Amino acid sequence: MQEATFLILTALADSSQHGYGIIADVRQISGGRVKLRAGTLYTALDRLRTDGLVEVDREEIVEGRLRRYYRLTPTGTTVLAEEAVRLRANAAAALRRLDPGLAGGMA
Amino acid sequence: MNGQDRLERGYRRLLAWYPRSFRRDSEDEIVAVLLATAEEDQQRVRLTEAADLIRGALRMRLRPACPPPRSVRGAVRLMCAGAGVQLAAAITMMVTAATVRAAVASQPGLAAVQRSQELSLLTFREIGAVLAVGVWLLTAWAISQGRDVARFSFSSFFVLITLTVLIGLAQHGASDAAADMIAGAAVWLIALAAMVLIFTRQSNRYYRQAVQPALNS
């Protein structure tokens, strides 16, 4: 799974969000490192919707413009959880090899 | 026209690159997000934004409507392998062209007309080998995109490959160069395996599904 996809799913893990909210949240989650652009976000969202990982939660009209909220599907939640566990295991292995003392700090 | 209207028009012009069904569903929403993320005094689309939107549009247009099953992925890999073998054959033909032509020209007992025919046939085979590489790759791409018509184009290509191999055997038989026979047999076997894979039940189901979104885009 690409990092942008992982971060988008993470942004939707605890609540539904609209496009601008996802961009802001991804920036915050990544500590300002990942700045999603609209083209990247909506191409990823379109794929995630096709794959059944994300769905539309609701739509609102704010100041005359469409605002669509997205949420994780049960499949999306499972896929994200599996990916998070995989990444945690990889990170723990890397840290163990780099410095055995550091791996003890991993949850 | 104020600055924001100009900016919105610029965004919409770039969004025109996306598939129609996607624009119908999401264009207004993306424009809202683009305007929300734009700088306060921004009046024109930035180069980085334009590159991102065009990249997104290309990705959306080039990727298949739904992920292909294992059988189709296998067929695409085989077709790429077929293109590789065909390319190797084409390169060998190009490298040995002068030697082969010289051998034909100096062959005793050949009438001028026969010699001319042999040389024309060689040219035809060389051009055909290069074109075949393109056909293999183009078909592999179309097959991976879920285009049903590509399966039938590949079937015609398979018939052509079969006829070429059979004609080669009938004309030259055992006297044909061993390398030619092996390359021909390898290409034919790869094509046969790819044919079987694109017409499995799993592949048929995929192509039936893939046709629906394509009709709506």
Image: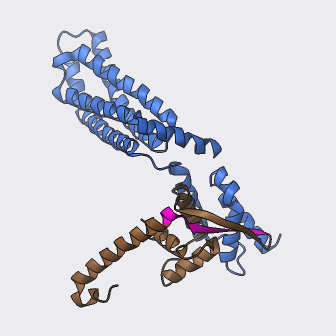
Chain colours: A brown, B blue
x and y, in percent, of residue B155 in the image: 42, 28
Q: Tell me what residue is drawn at x 22 percent, y 87 percent.
A: A100
Q: Tell me what residue is drawn at x 18 percent, y 25 percent.
A: B177
Q: Is residue A25 above or below residue A48?
A: below
Asked if residue B16 can be seen in this view, the reply is no
Q: Is residue B72 above or below residue B30?
A: above
Residue A17 placement, left or right of B141 = right
Does A78 appear in magenta? no
Q: Is residue A25 above or below residue B123?
A: below
Does A72 appear in magenta? yes
The residue lying furthest to the front in this view is A74
Q: Is residue B96 above or below residue A86?
A: above
Residue B209 placement, left or right of B46 = left
x and y, in percent, of residue A83 in the image: 40, 69
Q: Which residues are magenta?
A: A64-76
Residue B36 placement, left or right of A82 = right
User: Is the stretch drawn in magenta largely helix, strand or loop?
Assistant: strand
- Taking depth in this image into account, of B31 and B65 the one nearest to the observer is B65
x and y, in percent, of residue B122 in the image: 30, 24
- Taking depth in this image into account, of A25 and B78 the one nearest to the observer is A25
- Taking depth in this image into account, of A83 and A5 the one nearest to the observer is A83
Q: Tell me what residue is drawn at x 32 percent, y 37 percent.
A: B82
x and y, in percent, of residue A81 in the image: 43, 71
Q: Quadrant of the N terminus of chain B?
A: bottom right
Asked if residue B160 can be seen in this view, the reply is yes
User: So how many labels did they put on this image?
Assistant: 0
